Amino acid sequence: MNCDICKLAIKDNYYKDPWGNKYHSYHKKDGFFCNTCSRIISVRTTGGGFQFNDGRYMCKLCQTSIIKTDKEQSKSINSVIKLLNEKGIDIALNGIDISIVDKKTLQESIIHLSNHNEETIKGITILNNGKYEINILWGLTELEFKSVLAHELLHVWIDYNNIRLNEEKLEGFCNLGSAIVYKYYNNQLAKILLQSMENNNDPIYGKGYRYMRSMLEIHGWESLISILLNNNQN
Ligand SMILES: [Zn+2]
Ligand SMILES: [Zn+2]
Ligand SMILES: [Zn+2]
């Protein structure tokens, strides 16, 4: 067996990334990992990669799917709205501002919303003077952008309908939105990201997601939506 980074034989300890790349354990120490797909970045495994000025790394393979133009962005927004719609979740885009922001701006906007991890956060929804503001990190690939957006749009839907959920159920439900996107794409990256959400041991984002996923399995979208709507505080 040979290393996928240096091509030399692997005789003892090695790592395997979710894509099946096998590499000598000593490459990990000074290796860089793609923030999107978790591949170890190297000429042979990813054709190289680059670093954003905010510290994130991205491999060449993912770089090709970054959302670059406003047109690509609005196309992505519309397709997420449509995917949620097909499950029975109606969201009207008027009253929602979607902005692409840098990491610092995103981190500053969550200072008062404690439950998010500052390092890994990719999106946030803020209610500002009766208008929902969704901030999404710049430089995401189409799949990441859509999964983050689906999560944030479910926050809007929950809030708009005055549904009160504890943190665990709330974030768990919003992660169902990301799962819709992953399942729709169903390519290798989407499967890996869905799997890592399912295996997440965070008490809110992971446990909450598994709870809401089991609710969805029992009830289906239509009933789950009416259970939530009947639970509101109107
Ligand atoms: Zn090697
Ligand atoms: Zn990548
Ligand atoms: Zn959230």
Image: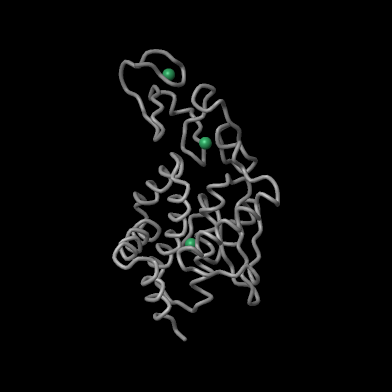
Q: How is the image coloured?
A: one colour
Q: Nearer the viewer, residue 193 or 117?
A: 193
Q: Residue at x 40, y 81 (%)?
A: 230
The image quarter in which residue 56 lies: top right
Residue 121 place in picture, x, y as percent: 52, 53
Q: Would you place residue 232 above or below residue 18 in this image? A: below
Q: Would you place residue 53 above or below residue 109 in this image? A: above
Q: Residue at x 41, y 42 (%)?
A: 192
For residue 5, side relative to residue 132 (left or right) = left
Q: Would you place residue 146 above or below residue 26 in this image? A: below
Q: Quadrant of the N terminus?
A: top left
For residue 95, side relative to residue 46 (left or right) = right
Residue 5 place in picture, x, y as percent: 46, 21
Residue 9 place in picture, x, y as percent: 37, 13
Q: Which residue is situated farthest in the bottom direction here?
A: 234
For residue 149, side relative to residue 100 (left or right) = left
Q: Nearer the viewer, residue 229 or 55?
A: 229
Q: Residue at x 60, y 63 (%)?
A: 134
Q: Residue at x 63, y 77 (%)?
A: 130
